[in-house]
Image (cartoon, rainbow, N blue to C red):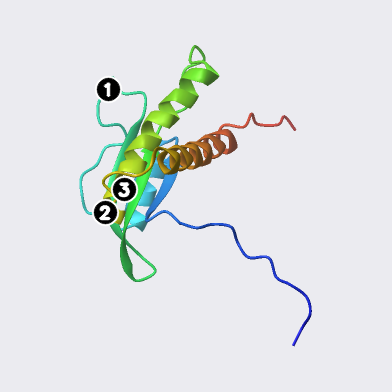
């Protein structure tokens, strides 16, 4: 027996929906093939959308799970950081609704919903920042 203690992960709930951010059609189509999605799906749902969330039922580790892919092409230079953040929060809401449905949670507390939206939005924003980092000149 050891006299040390072990700190445990603080996560109380993990998302029932796997989600990702995609900024190119090529990467999106490649991921659809990898996930074996046999639907004819376009990167953006329509020409006037700045972002789109696609939700699929996929097999992950031998189990059926919901997977959401947020598609947002790198925006034109006139789109501000605030507008990008707002788009990602909008798409995060679609993911949150999928999670709520999976959990059978019809009336979550406002605090649970706020934490969930904060977490999903933050993950999407970090993924966006990681994908659009300016290239270093060599």
Q: CA distance from mark 1 to mark 2?
A: 33 Å
Q: CA distance from mark 3 to mark 2?
A: 6 Å
Q: Nearer the viewer, residue 130 or 84?
A: 84
Query: Marks 3/1: CA distance?
Result: 29 Å
The residue at 56%/38% (across/down) is 126
Q: Position of residue 125 (x, y in %)?
A: 52, 34
For the point 45% across and 40% down, which residue is it? Answer: 111
Disc on res. 100: 3
Number of numbered discs visible in the structure rendering: 3
Which residue is disc 2 drawn over? 104
Image-quadrant location for residue 48: top left
Report helix, strand or loop for mark 1: loop
118 is higher (above) or lower (below) than 47? below
- The mark that comes first in sequence, 3 or 1, is 1
> x, y percentage for residue 101?
26, 49
In the image: residue 127, left or right of residue 41? right
N-term mark: 1 or 2: 1
Disc 1: which residue: 47
Residue 42 vs residue 14, the one in the foreground: 14
**Dot 2: element:** loop
Binning the other alpha carbons within 10 Å of mark 3 as few (below 14), some (14 to 19) or many (20 upward) gives some
Which residue is at the front of the view, 116 or 95? 116
Residue at far right of view: 3
**Quadrant of the rendered structure where residue 89 is?**
top left
Q: Is residue 35 above or below residue 30?
A: below
């Amino acid at each position: 027996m050891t006299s040390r203690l072990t700190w445990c992960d603080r996560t109380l709930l993990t998302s029932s929906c796997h989600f990702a951010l995609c900024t190119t059609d090529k990467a999106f189509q490649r991921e659809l093939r990898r996930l074996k999605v046999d639907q004819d799906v376009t990167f953006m749902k329509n020409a006037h959308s700045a972002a789109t969330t696609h939700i699929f039922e996929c097999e992950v580790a031998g189990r059926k799970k919901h997977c959401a892919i947020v598609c947002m092409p790198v925006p034109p230079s006139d789109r501000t950081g605030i507008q990008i953040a707002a788009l990602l929060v909008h798409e995060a809401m679609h993911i949150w609704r999928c999670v709520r449905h999976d959990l059978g949670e019809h009336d979550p507390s406002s605090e649970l919903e706020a934490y969930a939206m904060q977490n999903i939005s933050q993950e999407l924003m970090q993924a966006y920042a990681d994908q659009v980092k300016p290239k270093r000149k060599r």
